[in-house]
Image (cartoon, coloured by chain):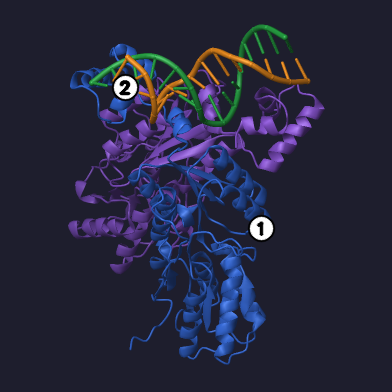
Chain colours: A blue, B purple, C green, D orange
Amino acid sequence: MNIYDVAKLSNVSIATVSRVINNKPGVSTAARDRVLKAIEETGFRPNQIAKSLTNNKTNILGIVMPGMNNYYSDRIDAINKVCKQRGYGLMITANYKDSNSTEEDIANFNLLHEKRVDGIIYFPTNVMQEHIDAIKRIRKKMPVVITDKEIRDLRLPCVIQDFVSPTQEIVDYFIQKKHKRIAFIKGSSYDRSNATRHEAYKTALTEAGLTYDEALVAEGAYSVDSGYAAMMEIILRCEVMPTAVFAANDHMAIGAMKALKEKGVRIPMEIEVIGYDDIEFAKYVTPSLSTVRVDQYVMGKLAATMLIDLIEGDLKDHHEMTMGYELIHRESTRKVTS
Amino acid sequence: MNIYDVAKLSNVSIATVSRVINNKPGVSTAARDRVLKAIEETGFRPNQIAKSLTNNKTNILGIVMPGMNNYYSDRIDAINKVCKQRGYGLMITANYKDSNSTEEDIANFNLLHEKRVDGIIYFPTNVMQEHIDAIKRIRKKMPVVITDKEIRDLRLPCVIQDFVSPTQEIVDYFIQKKHKRIAFIKGSSYDRSNATRHEAYKTALTEAGLTYDEALVAEGAYSVDSGYAAMMEIILRCEVMPTAVFAANDHMAIGAMKALKEKGVRIPMEIEVIGYDDIEFAKYVTPSLSTVRVDQYVMGKLAATMLIDLIEGDLKDHHEMTMGYELIHRESTRKVTS
DNA sequence: TTGTACGCGTTATCAA
DNA sequence: TTGATAACGCGTACAA
């Protein structure tokens, strides 16, 4: 069923059918009615593939991400909604063997290029030179917007998170509460945002006159269990227990709290705990978890909007946005409200 | 940059370039090398839009779902992975105003039809006559696979959940533990799977000689807060407290536990609680939550595999699969291990 | 107001 | 082993 069939059925030419489909003027009411009737009867739907070929526009946005999981679902939801509102479809690509495989990421960029999407949103984790080369190639063809963190040497339009300020604010908060031994459970080392937070943690300590102690730092893998293990590691390693912990995500913070509970350490009386992300369950665990909230929905919305604006030429210049954040105090800290 | 440019650069015809791109025989080594070199140098990527137009195949799967959230992320992840492995792209469509809007669902079906995806996976919630009509129309063009629950009158290939057996098993478990007052927190009434579970609950009670008491049933909206409210409703309504609760999802079960804790009711000593879904945090709440696990990842994998098999003609007949389930006992029940 | 014919970038058929 | 050409379904000048 194509435009020719509809034309035949309604005794007009394909040009007229095209005009009706696209609501263009210059069609008599009689002809328009006949065409609409034929479309209705046959269930004809214009072939966007053919349309894309002539227009050189697909009205599809692409996403390159490491893998679909709870952390990203709000962001995807937002992107999806913006797409729908503005008449775009959404193609998602994620890795299937190793969420951190450079090779698969490149294949995903290539796939989206071949599908001739109008633009790409990239969620980077561990950025290698190959990524940079691929993006340099593809951005000649279409706009690429990046989220979370920028890539140096590559001035991409982006919606990034500020990983330094929240870390600073947390450490400063702990210091102001007279804590001397502040532990840090960091995330996987291949993810640059962890190096950033690690640095910020060091700097904040040093600036406050405290010495950085490696015994107070352990690496987890973002899971509850790895947070539990990291906390245990720190506990066993230290002769003097830490009195504050900052974990790079809520999962690990929750795992750490479990370890602390098992060791009989009371939260927040003997140790204060702060996580990161404000996942849904942060407020339902016991004690409820203090954490840093960066609105993933807003980030997705901004990124998608920026990309579509870029595509449609509404946005000429280079744009960088930095997401705000909120330090949320719940029961795992004992904030003194002044 | 298209096949003509590459042909010109390598002094061959477009037919030869096409043969090289598609690894077809009948090309001299010399010609092949020249073409590959030109492709390398120019960064040429074949235009899949044009390819789709001639082949009448896009190699894209479509998903129609109410909205992206944590509940669906594992399923999407699995579908995505199967797509990648088998050389398909994935287009996701979800609603943007109201996750339960029939109108938006129909628009999504139409969008995917226009994009000429090769097949669709549909996650139904509240199925209306309009959905049925739309599916009837679209399945003439491409295979449609449905998940979660079947639609009567529409023998679609599907990967469904068995909502009756787990409900029965749970009620039977409670009855075997001599519970007389078994509460049920059901989900939103527009979702048919709740009616199914409600019926199964009634039946199981009746068959065991217990009378169905409406005071023990409340409706929530799948959120923790709504579960809390529903539990409170039941508590306030009942002169004799229930001694067992079954909630239609883990969020509501966790909310219910919070309400019970506040009222000083001890879990599981004074009341046993069972949820549904086995969300990530079921095992981390206190007490850890007993629940029913239906593997969303497997469901996604099966649905995607079924759809691609259907598309590629590997699967001729009508297929229905029913997902298995597992009743997981944790601390919110006191199972007697025999 | 209507229709014809070309172009979009591929694949496939057929001839050379 | 090659290449010329029709077809895929649409939009759009341009002509009528």
Residue A226 horizontal/vertical position (percent) = 59, 65
CB within 8 Å, label 2 to label 1: no
| Residue receiving disc 2 | A17
Residue D14 horizontal/vertical position (percent) = 39, 24
Badge 2 or badge 1: first in the primary sequence: 2
- Amino acid type, residue under disc 1 in the picture: Met
Mark 1 element type = loop
Residue A266 appears anywhere in the view: no
**Residue B145's quadrant in the figure?**
top left
Residues at discs 2 and 1 both on one chain: yes
Residue A159 appears anywhere in the view: yes
> How far apart in space, not on screen, are marks 2 and 1 (Cα)?
50 Å
Along the line of sight, the residue nearer the viewer: B322 or A35? A35
Left or right for B11, reference A140: right
Residue B17 horizontal/vertical position (percent) = 68, 28
- The residue positioned 38% from the left and 34% from the top of the image is B111
| Residue receiving disc 1 | A128
**Residue A7's quadrant in the figure?**
top left
Which chain's residue wears label 2? A
Mark 2 element type = helix
Along the line of sight, the residue nearer the viewer: B222 or B135? B135
Left or right for B21, reference A296: right
Circle 2 residues within 10 Å: few <14, some 14–19, many ≥20: many
- The residue positioned 66% from the left and 51% from the top of the image is A102
- Amino acid type, residue under disc 2 in the picture: Val
